[in-house]
Amino acid sequence: MKYKVVCLCAGLALAGLTACSAPAPESSEDQPKAETATAQSQEASSANETISFTDQAGNTVELDKTPERFVTTALPLPSVYAITGSPTDRLVGMHPGSLSAIESGVMGAMYPELTKIPTNFIDGENINIEELLKLKPEAVMYWADYTQQYEMMNHAGIKTIGVTTQGKGDALYTLQTWLEIMGKMFGTSGDTDKVINYGKEVSAEIQKKLESVPDDKKVKTLIIFNHNGKDMTTSGGTHYGQVWIESTGGINVARDIEGTPAISMEQVYEWNPDVIIVSSFTKYTAEDILENKIEGQDWSNVAAVKNKRVYKEPVGIYRWYPPSGDAPLMTQWMAQKQYPELFDYDMKQKVIEYYKQFYNYDLSDAQAEGILNSNPDAAKGADWQQGAQKK
């Protein structure tokens, strides 16, 4: 039996997870709302001859009908699409960096059919147009910044929809805009309002508690966005990490730099962060830094290491750094890691309750622990370059 998601995600970006607990059988009264929305969207799409909108590359997109064969090259999009409630069998191609997150996390258990989708048409940001054409795509969603992808696909006659980060790195707002585009394409973006409203409630609660933290007591936080064993990148002031850190009360030590720039150990020493977050776009774990296992780098004198405040970002419905359905959970997790004395969340219980409420999915304890202790294999296919990246 397939699990279906009742509502979407917000605020926001996957092994060691055991088999999932069995769900209660679906009754006619307990059908996910997304199924009804999908049926209505199918009726609506058949009545409309053309779907027209402007994508985030500024291009006018015109589709003859709702795409029945749909491909994504931007890594978070398969997980975003799946939770809209639209049929997953429309998705016929994805990036290998998307697949690794799905296979290494709970998404693979929730949507096992996604693990069989072809990925051989793209390596890093390089598309093999011949392999892509074999998938017979009616539409492809891609990173708008990769203009070479657009030019290649446009020349081949493939309909393209460009997406990019919105709101200066605000993952929740970015997610909303992607869902609006998918809503136009497929007639539904799932029952997202409840999750987005919940995310806002979580943020308001966190902001209220943070009022007691004076500016001179705020923690300084570094995100290691990617690391290849020698070079590393961080999240600057215009990427997702900026909002994650500062909306939960911290100071992003790299806030004066744009994008996801390369940084040196000398820069890390100068910043001397109180907290380090290691993203799921790198195979390295918190233990690798805490135990000084990375050859050629000495982390032992950094404050976050001395105080054992280095953490690996979770992977649930997708990696928690970029836009994903788990954004409210990421907000709570970040707040707790930066200010554990203020936010005594039982994150495992929070994760279990969230998946039940918003995905109608019963996580086992082991699955919830697996989300919070993410598998390094989730980085496979997602770490092809250092420097400015779109994830």
Image (tube, grey):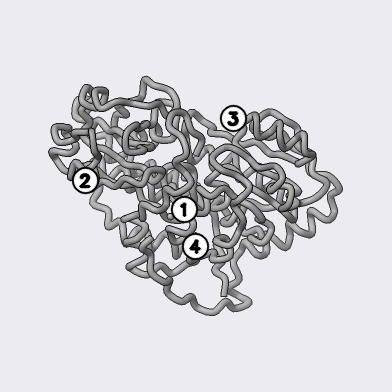
**Can residue 207 be seen in this snapshot?**
no
Q: Nearer the viewer, mark 4 or mark 2?
A: 4
In the rendered image, residue 376, in percent from the top left (x then y), is placed at 36, 52
Q: Secondary structure at mark 4?
A: helix
Q: Are marks 4 and 1 in contact (CB under 8 Å)?
A: no
Residue that label 1 marks:
101
Q: CA distance from mark 3 to mark 4?
A: 29 Å
Residue 145's disc number:
3
Residue that label 2 marks:
340
**Can residue 217 be seen in this snapshot?**
yes
Q: CA distance from mark 4 to mark 2?
A: 31 Å
In the rendered image, residue 63, in percent from the top left (x then y), is placed at 79, 44
Residue 108's disc number:
4
Q: Secondary structure at mark 1?
A: helix
Q: CA distance from mark 4 to mark 1?
A: 8 Å
Mark 3 or mark 4, which has the lower sequence index?
A: 4
For the point 24% across and 38% down, which residue is it? 295
Q: Secondary structure at mark 2?
A: loop
Mark 4 or mark 1, which has the lower sequence index?
A: 1
Question: Is residue 32 shown above or below 191?
Answer: below
Give the quadrant of residue 373.
bottom left
Residue 191 shown left or right of residue 15 in the figure: right
Q: Which amino acid type is marked by label 3? A: Asp
Q: Please state, as top left, top right, bottom left or bottom right, where the N terminus lies in the image.
A: bottom right
Q: Which amino acid type is marked by label 4? A: Gly
Q: Which amino acid type is marked by label 1? A: Ala
Q: CA distance from mark 3 to mark 2?
A: 38 Å
Give the quadrant of residue 56.
top right
Q: CA distance from mark 3 to mark 1?
A: 22 Å
